[in-house]
């Protein structure tokens, strides 16, 4: 098990909550300050951004929990002020659907749309407890046998500020890229949590699916792997404690790859799934 934070943060009182906070300006419009603390290489992390929009939609819709959320990343977001505009598409008894877009200003003062999201929300606590699945938790060594950024084994070029905010311990079997010997397999597995000890909730699951190094690294492709589209399914409320995240890629072609992620909690429940399409920059 991971080492506990000296003073454990709680849901609602954590750096993650402060940095994803939205301020209602008028109905459907929220002001946001995107934190530089969630950048990787040269961009704001896509999972963090999705959590920001997810929080705005949780406020705008009559339900609190994201069940499914799909985002198209249109332009690269930068740390600093942003505006989220939401629209309630349908407010139902058990499911509500909304859309949201995040905007910033470019160097010429023009408003630019960064991300557009469509999502359905509900109440995870009302779902039946029956589970019928062939899915199995990933086999990851104990956390004491895994390695993270603090172990100086993850040489990611550029900013890696996000690493200071995460408890991330990678399976050594998916760390060949850090040792100069990538396996060639599109696999990445890790223990995941927030560095301040805050337990996971449905909104932080939107971060968890996009917080590991890209699977492209193990396929001997280094550098920025920007997300084009990301869809997340939240399946149940996670139990307290660290999560296990497994990401796989089966097809890198035409300069794009898919990443399929599963997130498991300590009670061996599959709490979230995702698929994203990302662009890779192949060397000539």
Image (spheres, grey):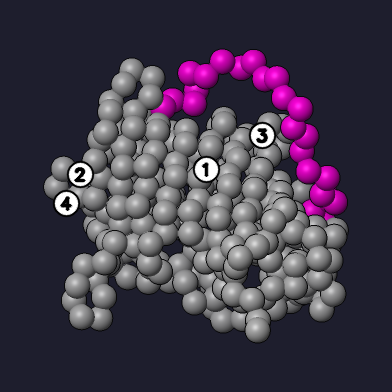
Mark 1 or mark 4: whose residue is earlier in sequence: 4
Disc nearer the start of the sequence (2/3): 2
Which residue is labeled 3 in the image?
A: 270
Q: Secondary structure at mark 4?
A: strand
Q: Nearer the viewer, mark 2 or mark 1?
A: 1
- The reply to whether dot 4 and dot 3 touch (C-beta < 8 Å) is no
The image quadrant that residue 267 belongs to is top right
**Residue sitting at x 62%, y 54%:** 258
Confirm or deny contact between disc 2 and disc 1 (CB under 8 A).
Answer: no
Rendered view: 36 above or below 171: below
Front residue of 149/215: it is 215
Q: Are marks 1 and 4 in contact (CB under 8 Å)?
A: no
Residue corresponding to mark 2:
28
User: Spatial distance from mark 2 to mark 1, Cα to Cα?
Assistant: 23 Å
Residue at 35%, 52% (x, y): give it. 116
Q: Residue at x 52, y 66 (%)?
A: 226
Location of the C terminus by quadrant is bottom right
Q: Which residues are magenta?
A: 122-144
Mark 2: give few (<14), some (14-19) or many (20+) Cα within 10 Å.
some
Q: Nearer the viewer, residue 199 or 209?
A: 209
Residue at the far bottom: name it: 284
Q: Which mark, by number, is residue 25? A: 4
Residue 114 is situated, as x and y percent measured from the top left of the image, at: 34, 62
Residue 164 included in the magenta stretch of the image? no
Q: CA distance from mark 2 to mark 3?
A: 32 Å
Q: Which mark is residue 232?
A: 1
């Amino acid at each position: 098990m991971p080492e506990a934070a000296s003073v454990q943060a709680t849901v609602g009182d954590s750096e993650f909550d402060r940095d994803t906070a939205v301020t209602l300006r008028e109905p459907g419009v929220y002001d946001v300050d995107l934190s530089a603390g969630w950048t990787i290489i040269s961009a704001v992390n896509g999972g963090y951004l999705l959590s920001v929009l997810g929080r705005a939609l949780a406020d705008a819709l009559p339900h609190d929990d994201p069940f499914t959320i799909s985002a198209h990343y249109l332009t690269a977001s930068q740390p600093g002020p942003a505006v989220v505009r939401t629209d309630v598409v349908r407010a139902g008894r058990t499911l509500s659907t909304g859309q949201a877009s995040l905007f910033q200003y470019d160097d010429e003062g023009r408003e630019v749309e960064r991300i557009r999201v469509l999502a359905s929300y509900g109440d995870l606590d009302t779902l039946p407890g029956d589970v019928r699945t062939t899915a199995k938790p990933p086999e990851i060594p104990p956390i004491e046998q895994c390695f993270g950024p603090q172990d100086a084994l993850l040489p990611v070029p550029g900013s890696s500020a996000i690493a200071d905010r995460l408890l991330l311990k990678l399976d050594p079997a998916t760390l060949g890229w850090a040792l100069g010997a990538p396996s060639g397999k599109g696999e990445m597995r890790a223990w995941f949590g927030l560095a301040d000890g805050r337990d996971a909730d449905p909104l932080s699951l939107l971060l968890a699916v996009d917080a590991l190094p890209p699977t492209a690294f193990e396929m001997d492709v280094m550098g920025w792997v920007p997300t084009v589209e990301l869809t997340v399914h939240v399946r149940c409320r996670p139990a307290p404690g660290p999560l296990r995240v497994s990401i796989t890629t089966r097809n890198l072609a035409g300069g794009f790859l898919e990443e399929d992620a599963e997130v498991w909690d300590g009670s061996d429940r599959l709490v979230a799934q995702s698929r994203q399409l990302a662009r890779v920059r192949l060397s000539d």
